[in-house]
Amino acid sequence: MELQRNFFIFAFLFASFLLWQAWQSQSLTKNKTNETTNSLFNSNYKKEDKNQIIIQNDVMRLVINMYGGDVEEASLLNYKEKLNSPKCLKLLETTSDFVYQAQSGLIGRDGPDNSINGIRPLYSAKKNFFELRNNKNELRVPITFIGKNGVTYIKNFILKSGRYDVQVEYDIHNSTKKNLELSIFGQLKQTIKLPKNRDIYSGNFALQTFRGAAYSSSDTKYEKYKFDNIANNKHLHIMTYDGWIAMLQQYFVVSWIPETSISSNIMYTSYLDNSIAVIGYKSSLINIPSDSRYVIKSKLWIGPEKQQEMALVAPNLDLTVDYGWLWFLSQPLFKLLSIIHNFIGNWGFSIVLITFMMKGITYPLTKAQYTSMAKMRELQPKINELKKNFGHDKQRMSREMMALYKKEKINPLGGCLPIFIQMPIFLSLYYMLIGSVELRHAPFLFWIKDLSDQDPYYVLPIVMGLTMFFIQKTSSNSISDPFQQKIMSFMPVVFTLFFLWFPSGLVLYYIISNLVTIIQQKFILSNFKKK
């Protein structure tokens, strides 16, 4: 099997993967009929109501709507909206054309959010701005609502320094003479269709990752739940004793993690008539005795997909990092890349070093590939003779070819198999580079300011195409068919066009890989000729 045909097979598989990836990430169905849901879950506060407070630590700023105490806006202070932008990334927001909120409340017979007309309880606070000071480790912000029954509900938001998880506590003071019966719920709601100013995937099929809902339960460690499933009324409804619900996008996640020691929870999804997808949880009934105090806790993660930190907040929450179907390769590769980065301090040079390591590990495959290619080239005159003698009889030709391979001790798949083995490594690096928030806006050298984005001047893809062209030319004297020659001559061009939109970090990996391949090829073939 000639090396050029291997390139053709690899290119075909790679192109098929890209087309499949783009198809998977297409815009989701928007105009489906929704099912009737509880009025609470459909309700929105009126935009003209300005009852808000702002709470902030050193990594994020939250805007809380005092109607229900929902988080209607969240800005990440250490992440920019775009490269070199002065604006912080706004993960949650509420505008006329886009809604992304983290809601929570108390429902049931005595829950203050259990309103027939959908009006949420109006909480009060001592002031409208709370900030975690530099000399403090924790910020506790209480907001209070006193019901008509005289029960006091205190909703506490607890932020810690450097942390993206928010503790949300309901402190319920039942001073009445009867028992209370209620449930806690937490849900995330988001408009399915992104407005243009938030569509990070515009015009770049190569960088698209999963955007949608996800959950973890007693029976399932991690499961994605597509927005189109919600829009098509294929709703989630399961009971669980632990887990979490979340909404994902590239690099960032918002997740509710309920307290599991007090009750079981039902996880659900719903679809609102204004094209909003909802995923949430609702606890079983909680009984609060008369003249008593009861605290119900939950956690809310609003931030980047930092695997180590998320793993400490909730089991399996770190699995939300979207490494695709090759996660079992991408995860250890990222850990290795992180270790290298700790010593080098530059993600670009870390990619260069890990490329050398990968090429060293796969050197036996590369050697087998080029040795097989060299043997096949030496065998070409005999193969041409067999074609001349038995070309009219395909079965005889096949038998004679296999006998020749056996006599010369050549594996006809020897040059093809290494490419199939190395392809998963390449794809796992692709998933890692577009899924790891640590590489977002990470600079390399000169004009490469963001390794997770495409090269703005297309220099790296062109260099990659030239290295591929050189490899092809130094290995391409065994194909006699004119049609195959034309196809192979276009392969570097096709790959260059594909790589124009690829993350510059991945193109950098491929350039270094090609350069190492050129050196290895020269070394292997020169040693083969000496034998």
Image: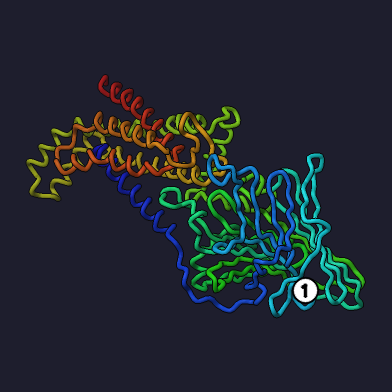
Can you name the residue that lies furthest to the top here? 530
Q: How many marks?
A: 1
Q: Nearer the viewer, residue 169 or 224?
A: 169
Q: Nearer the viewer, residue 83 or 223?
A: 83
* Local crowd size for mark 1, using a 10 Å CA cut-off: few (<14), some (14–19), many (≥20): some
Q: Quadrant of the C terminus?
A: top left
Task: Give the quadrant of residue 483.
Answer: top left
Q: Is residue 164 above or below residue 65?
A: above
Residue 286 visible from this viewpoint? yes
Image x and y of residue 469, in percent = 28, 33
Q: Secondary structure at mark 1?
A: loop
The percent coordinates of residue 428 (x first, y second) are 46, 44
Residue 87 versus residue 357: which sits nearer the camera?
Answer: 87
- Above or below, 388 against 512 in this view is below
Question: Which image quarter: residue 284?
Answer: bottom right
Q: Quadrant of the N terminus?
A: top left
Q: Do we see residue 264 in this rendering? A: no
Identity of the residue drawn at 30% across and 48% down: 12
Query: Residue 95 placed where, x, y %?
Result: 59, 61
The location of residue 524, given as percent across then percent down, is 32, 25
Question: In the image, what residue type sits under mark 1?
Answer: Gly
Relative to 445, 239 lies left or right: right
Pointer 1 residue: 111
Judge left or right: residue 489 versus residue 451. left
